[in-house]
Structures are given as structure tokens and as C-alpha cells.
Amino acid sequence: MVNTDSIRTVVGIIGNVISFGLFLSPLPTFVKIFKAKSVEEFKPDPYLATILNCIMWSFYGSSLVSEDNILVLTINGIGFFIEVFYTLIFFTYSNWNKRKKILIVLFIEAIFTVVVIFCTLHFVHTLKQRTMIIGIICIVFNILMYFSPLTVMRLVIKTKSVKYMPFLLSLANFANGLIWVIYAAFRWDPYLVIPNGLGALSGLVQLILYACYYKTTDWGEDRPQFEMSKV
């Protein structure tokens, strides 16, 4: 019989694939930004939040903090570089006010990262304690990553338009949260279950909003190449 560790590994690999899809899902948005040479009404919040989220989860998945979480480390390490790339594009095509906001947030994130890693490695000496401390921090920032689209969701409700809420990103958020909840359930890791459960819920709400406001959206020349009946 296949043991639970093997199943957990397979689920983790599937989670890596879905997470990779999540990280790549904003590509159509950045193609649009590149062509327009402007970020228009798109927000940098999700990408800035995800950078810090990836850093913290990479640290959590390392052998310095937890055991047997290499799949958490690998996908978040990859995600970090992808999100930095997105942020650089966003920075390039933003006005000065948005650039200033991006720089301030990145500076704060860098200082926070250095302080957390230094304090954890020098003042916390057991893996159990490190897992708990970094796990709680990861929960907070994973929630920020998943719920950072709230600013966009408010815009959707206000304008009755989903033009600036990418469908693929919402779908990937939902699927990603769900698969990592399953992964964490095999060895009951609450630090993975709680934020990813909320992430799946956030993605579901976004999909519901998309279904509600798709028909009232003025797409112009940007209508997606799929039918809502297939969603």
C-alpha cells in the first residue's frame, strides 16, 4: 500500500505546480501593462505582499526552521524571483507616486526580513520554537497575500466591473489554497492549514464576484478569450 508520506509528497508536488501557475497567472496583466506602457488602474499591492510572503515561507520551509518541508521552500523561492520581476515591471511603468510607494514598502519588507531572520537564528534555539514563531508570522503574511486583492474587490463592487481583477489569478488563488490545505492535513500543520484555508475562501469570493459582474463589465478590446459558461 502507498503510505501517507508518499501521498503527501505527491500532493505537495501538485501544490508546487499549482502554485507555479498562481505565480504565472498575472502574466496577461503584465503583457497588457507592457503594451500600454502604463499600469492604468492595476494595483501593486498583491505583488508586494507576495514578495514578503515568499521570503517568510522559504525561511519556514528551510531546515533551519522546520523538518521535511523542502517543497514549501522550493516553490516559494521560485515565487520570490517571479514576484520581484513583476514588481520591477510595475515600477517601470508607474508614475512617481506609485514608485515611491513601492520603494517604501520594499524597504520596510527588507528591514523586517533581516530582523526576523537574525532574531530567530540567534535567540530561538529549537526547531519547535522556530516553527511556531515563523509559522505564526507566515500565517499573517499569507493572509495579507491572499486578501491583498481586497482593494481590487472593492473596485469591482464599486464599478460593477471585473476588468482589473484578473480571472486566472483568482482561480489560481482558490486552487492553490485548497491543495495546500490537503497537503498540510496529512501531518496536521496548522501554520499551513489556517492561511491556505482562508486563501481558498478569498479565491472563491473573487470567483463569485467575477461571475456576478462579468456581464456588466465594459471590456472594450480586452474581452477574455473564454466564455463564462466554462467557468
Image (cartoon, grey):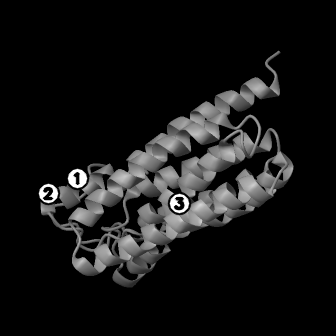
Q: Secondary structure at mark 1?
A: helix
Residue pointed to by mark 1: 31
* Left or right: where 150 falls relative to 117: left
* Left or right: where 88 falls relative to 138: left
Crowding at dot 1, Cα within 10 Å, few <14 / some 14-19 / many 20+, comes out as: few
* CA distance separating discs 1 and 2: 6 Å
Q: Nearer the viewer, mark 1 or mark 3?
A: 3
* Left or right: where 142 falls relative to 3: left
Q: Secondary structure at mark 2?
A: helix
Residue pointed to by mark 3: 52
Query: At which x and y percent is residue 82?
Result: 40, 47
Residue pointed to by mark 2: 35
Q: Nearer the viewer, mark 3 or mark 2?
A: 3
* Left or right: where 115 falls relative to 209: right
Mark 3 and mark 2 in contact? Answer it, CB < 8 Å. no
Query: At which x and y percent is residue 208?
Result: 50, 65
Check disc 1 and give the amino acid type: Val
Q: Residue at x 68, y 49 (%)?
A: 60
Tell me which label, 1 or 3, sits earlier in the chain: 1
Q: Residue at x 67, y 41 (%)?
A: 62
Q: Residue at x 24, y 68 (%)?
A: 39
* CA distance separating discs 1 and 3: 24 Å
Check disc 3 and give the amino acid type: Leu
Q: How many marks?
A: 3
Write down the quadrant of residue 105 in the picture.
bottom left
Check disc 2 and give the amino acid type: Lys
In the rendered image, the residue lying farthest to the bottom is 158
Compared to residue 72, the image places residue 117 above or below, namely: below
